[in-house]
Amino acid sequence: MSLPPQRQLDNYLSQFAEKQVDGKYLGLYDGERRFGRVFAWLHEQYNGAFEFMNAKAPQGVGGHFNADPSRDLMEVNETYSALLRIASKAGIRIKTKPEYQKVIDSSRGWLQPTLGSPIPEGLTPIEVEYYDTVFETEDSGIMLAGTNRVPLQFVGEGSYAIVHKFTDPNYGIQFARKKLKKGVKPKEVERFHREFDIMKRFDFPYILKVYRYNESDNSYTMEYCEHTLKDYISHNNQKMSPWARRKMAMQFLYAMNFLHKHGVCHRDLSYRNVLVHTYRGSDAFMVKVSDFGLAKEKTSDLTSTGSAMKGSIIDPALGSFRDFGPVNDIYSIGFILNYIFTGRRDLLADGSRLGSIIQKCSTTNSADRYQTVRDIIEDMKKAECLVG
C-alpha cells in the first residue's frame, strides 16, 4: 500500500538534510520551515549554473555549456520536477520566480548529457537573484473536518493578505479564506487578528460574517461574496434600475449606521471592500461591508495606527489618522453612494436631491457634513426619486 501524500513529501524532503547548503541561501528561506532547505539548495544550484551560462555566453550570444555542468543541471531539473510533482499530490503548489522558471523550462530543450550543450542565443544575460527568494509555497487546498483536502481557488490579494475560495463538500456551500502573507510584522498579525475579532462580534445582515480563526497559519474563514462593489457596478451599470440602486445604497447605509452605533469607525471604505453577494437565478443581492483591518473601536486602546494617513478615500479635513471619527467615515460614504447611483467616481453636483445628499456627505468642511449616518438615512427616505 502506498504512503499518504503528506508522508511521501516528508520522506522526499528528508534527503536534503544531508546536503551541503550555503548559509546565505538558507537565510533567505527562514520563513519556509518545511521547504526551506530544499528551496535553498535549488536556489544555490541554479545560481551556480546561471552564473556559468552568463560567463560562457555573454550578452545574448550563443555559447557552449560544458558536459559536467550540463549533467549537473539536468539532475537539478529532475529534482525540481520531482519536488513539484510530490508537493502537488500533497496539495501544495510551489511558485517560482518567472525569470528562473523561463530558463528552467528552456533548458529542458537544449541540455544534453554528453559533449556539452549549446546555449541558445538570446538566453543570457540571466538575472541571478542573490538577495531575495526564488521559490515559495502557495496553498492549493484546505483541510476540513471529516473530509479530504479541499481545493482552494485564488480570488485576490492585498498588501498583507491573500483570499481564496473553496466549496465545503459537506454542504455544497462556497466559503472564503483570508490568510496573512508570510513574513509580515507582528503588528500586522495583531491587526489581522483584531479585524477578525471585530467582525466576529457582529451579527448583522450587511456586514460580512466570519467564522473561525486558525492560529497556526493566521487565516480565517468567512462568507464568500461574488463581487466587489466596483466590479458589480461596472458590469451592471447600464441595466441597474433606480430601485435597485436605492436598495443597495440603503443596505450600505444600514451597515454603517450599525457600526457607528456600536462605536466602530471603518476608516478604509472603498469600492473594493464593500462586497456584493448575489443569488443564483434572480436579480437579488445583498451588500456586505468587509475589510476591518484599519477599523477603530471607540472603547478599545489596541488601535495603534499612528498619525499617518491610511485608507483608499482620504478625507482632506482629517489632520491625523488617530483622530478619525464617524464624520470622517461619512466623507467616504458620500463617494460610495455616488458610485452606487452613477457608476462614476466624480461626485454628482447637478442640484438634484441626490446630488445634495452626496455633496453634504463629502464636503471638505467636516462641520457642514452630516454628523450621523442616521441623518443620511432619513434624508434618503424622504427623497421620492434619486436618479433619472
Image (cartoon, rainbow, N blue to C red):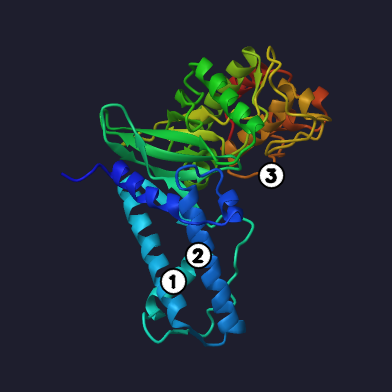
**Residue 268 seen from this side:** no
Q: In the rendered image of this protein, does residue 314 appear above or below residue 11?
A: above
Q: Is residue 171 left or right of residue 110?
A: left
Q: Earlier in the sequence, mark 2 or mark 1?
A: 2
Q: Which residue is mark 1?
A: 73
Q: Secondary structure at mark 1?
A: helix
As measured in the structure, the alpha-carbon distance from the residue carrying label 1 to the one carrying label 3 is 57 Å
Q: Quadrant of residue 327?
A: top right
Picture quarter with the N terminus: top left
Q: Which residue is mark 3?
A: 346
| Residue pictured at 71% horizontal, 16% vertical | 301
Q: Say few, some or many: other residues with alpha carbon within 10 Å of mark 1 (under 14 / 14 to 19 / 20 or more).
A: many
Q: Secondary structure at mark 3?
A: loop
Total residue callouts? 3
Q: Secondary structure at mark 2?
A: helix
As measured in the structure, the alpha-carbon distance from the residue carrying label 2 to the one carrying label 1 is 8 Å
- Give the label, 1 or 3, closer to the camera: 1
Q: Say few, some or many: other residues with alpha carbon within 10 Å of mark 2 (under 14 / 14 to 19 / 20 or more).
A: some
Q: Are marks 2 and 1 in contact (CB under 8 Å)?
A: yes
* Depth check, front residue: 38 or 91: 38
Picture quarter with the C terminus: top right
Residue 320 placement (x, y as % from top left): 81, 29
Q: Say few, some or many: other residues with alpha carbon within 10 Å of mark 3 (under 14 / 14 to 19 / 20 or more).
A: few
Q: Earlier in the sequence, mark 2 or mark 3?
A: 2
Q: Which residue is mark 2?
A: 45
User: Looking at the rendered structure, which numbered label has been put on residue 287?
Assistant: none
Residue type at tag 1: Leu
Residue 295 placement (x, y as % from top left): 65, 25
